[in-house]
Image (cartoon, coloured by chain):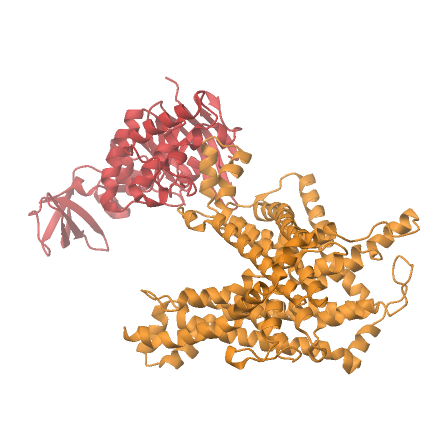
Amino acid sequence: MNSGNRRGLPGALLTLLLAWLVLYPILVVVAEAARGDAIAVFLSRGGEWHALWASLWISLASVALAAAVGVPLAFLFEWLDFPGRKTLGSVIALPAVLPPFVGVIAFLFLYGESGFVARAVQHVLGLERAPWRLQGAGAILLVHAYSMYVYFYLFTRAGLAKLDASMLEAAQALGAGRWETLRRVTLPLIRPALAGAALLVFMTALGSFSAPYVFGGGFRVMTTQIVATKLNGELPLAMVETVALAGVALGGLLILRHTEGDDILVALGKGTAPRRRPIQSVGGRALATAAGWLLALLLLLPHLTLGLVSLVPYGTWTTEAVPPVLSVVNYQRLFGEPERLRPLVNSLWMAAASTAAAVALALVAGALVGRRRPGRIPWRGPIEGLLALPWALPGTVFAVALATTFSVQHPWALRWVLVGTVVLLPLGLLVRNLPLTGRAVLAGFRQLDPALEEAAASLGAGRWAAFRRVTLPLLRPALAAGASLAFVAALGDFVTAIVLYTYDNRPISIEIMSSLRLSELGVAAAFGVILMGLSALVLAVGARR
Amino acid sequence: MTPFVRLDGVSKRFDTAVAADGVTLEVERGEVLALLGPSGSGKTTLLRLLAGFEQADAGRMIIDGADVGGLSPARRRCGMVFQHYALFPHLDVGENVAFGLRGKKPGGRVTVERQVAAVLALVDLAGFERRRVQELSGGQQQRVALARALAPEPRVLLLDEPLSNLDPALRERTRRELRQLIKRVGITTLFVTHEQEEAFDLGDRVAVLAAGRLDQVGTPDDLYERPASLFVATFVGRANVFRGAAAHALGGADGQIVVVRPEAFRFSEIGIPGVVKERRYTGAAAFYLVDGGRGERFEVLAAPGAARVGDRVFVEATRVLTFAEERE
């Protein structure tokens, strides 16, 4: 076919480029891991198995905890009506604007050994030392539950909003009570949404690095284990660990994908979603509202803590329950000293560059294989798969893979020495961004009515003009959504940076880390506040229709 | 004989709209009652009130001698067939039908399976147990919905626009089958429709609703021959409405409105003069649109060769219905 051939070549080129970016480094790692006796070392050390098992059970426990918090909340906000429901409903999604690493340090300031809550308890009870240490599996799970229940909350709400009220009424008319209806009709019907959220939480928790890194202490999960092994100089072993973690991720992905089974539940009815039931009793309404605001406050505490700590000048807060001095001196130093401003500039340019490149690649992919067209589209499967692959693997895996691949000079094998240059970290961020922009842009192309481009063509617009004047404007919301998510992810990135940064391109998260090491809590918090504010701003702009 | 289902002064408001305004209605055991009305007349609300999906603001609802007003839908034992069927997409045909049977019958799985098979056979879908509901045609889905509603042996069957989701070619056949099935089961049935033909064909009696009020309940003949209100006269069947002088000329008293059915007119040597403007041939007869001057236009049903377009004719009414002028 003529048109097939014409599209075949660019498709093949894009596939090769993507394969070099996302698949090749993984293969290099697998090959490195297979060399020598690293596998035997891995198998013989109990610590490795512990870390792998810890990664797995922490991820599963995170799914359970996030579901336990997010699902009931979704039902509450979707099915019941009470004063303040709308405002609270959006406040509840706020943990999403907290970049993982910033969230972790906010928790440190709030619930850590010398955090506000610990100090308050210490003062009230008159204790000698802090009443607890925020460390180990419990601390990691606490952070995970806080930051990941949002997935369950949002997915379940979306699922419930699509539910057909007459299904529930049918169950009732057939004699099913409220619980029975929930168990036998509602939950099975929203199963795809629940499975989607579970998958997302599982993958996020498995790849989570910040929380185990800061709170882990002696408790190692695979992501922190890999970085520690690499720092120890045991590179072959780090490769094996990377492959092991990748294997767990792919296994989890396959199993959860299998349970999703979304094709069964094609909606039959055309009914409307159930009406929200107002809480009738005055006491019930007051209770729901009070509980809602209490919850909102609890969710906002990390954000508020960060803001407060950022106002504490260095060395002024020692044993008091609340900081005695507040000033904006940290912000002044941050913007006044070029050395401190540098990480902010670094983060911004790297996030912008990696996002722009990821959007460009996604657009090319969409233009080549994204449109709805009858018949088989050459290279569609490989391109979509390669775009999604980085999502299926933890960030540490990719960071290590890139660092390994681009540490030798073999131009004929498409490998150059990029380690130690400022290029490698943005390249890593680009790879991490590909699934975000790719998913959004491909979905945008799929929703496009092919007749619109045909109409433009019949009105005399050439290929490029039709793309610029019709396709691109229609894709704008998808582009904005994908780009804003990618930008925020790159801006707040910690896991890729800790493996790939150099002094010259050190990003905000690394600077926060070193500020913490120097006990400059105020500066660290100020960076966190700026990161949080930028993230919220970019997400708000991206969500605008 | 006491009625099996009785609504007594049932009222329901939604925000500003009145959906049921003091409706009082009785249905005999085994009777099929059609609730007929234009959209927004509150007919579906009445059904949902009876099923328990809505709570009445006032009035009582009695089924088989017991007030069901306080019961949850799950305990009313009303079988409901929804407009879009509401079949559970995560369950197959057999599981859908068995849904209401769980935990009710002694004897467990085997009994349930036997019952499912029996009720599926009743709707002519024997052997369909393991089919996915998405694979079924619209007519088959409708019958599964009916089987599912009938399986727990409800006291009353409620049908919400049972045929509206089918294409017209299928509708008439399905209507006939539905009628036979309901009569065979002998279940007391209320069904909602906005189509007069459907109401007349399926209903033993028809209740006409307008703006939440019950205008008239009666047999199809009653409604057509002796409509209780101008609304019923115009909503049920074709009707020519005359006011003022024209009404007077047809024998109406002062302030009365006169309604004449097309077939109650005939061409004659005396009566209202007019010109035939259009002729619509329907086979056995033809409709003639006659312009009586001063903006009066009316329809006459007569033999296909009774007149031609352009003819000057006189029209005489053999039977008129008179109503008091409505007070706004």
The image shows residue A399 at horizontal and vertical percentages of: 62, 68
Left or right of residue B312: residue A103: right
Residue closest to the eye, B321 or A31: A31
Chain that is coloured red in the picture: B
Q: Residue furthest top?
A: B1
Chain A colour?
Answer: orange
- Is residue B162 among the parts visible in the rendering? no
Left or right of residue A286: residue A329: right
Q: Is residue B87 above or below residue A202?
A: above
Residue closest to the eye, A327 or A60: A60
The image shows residue B169 at horizontal and vertical percentages of: 22, 45
Residue closest to the eye, A486 or B185: A486
Say which residue appears at 55% left-offset and 52% top-offset.
A252
Q: Residue furthest front?
A: A36
- Quadrant containing the N terminus of chain A is bottom left
Q: Quadrant of residue A229?
A: bottom right
Say which residue appears at 71% left-offset and 58% top-offset.
A211
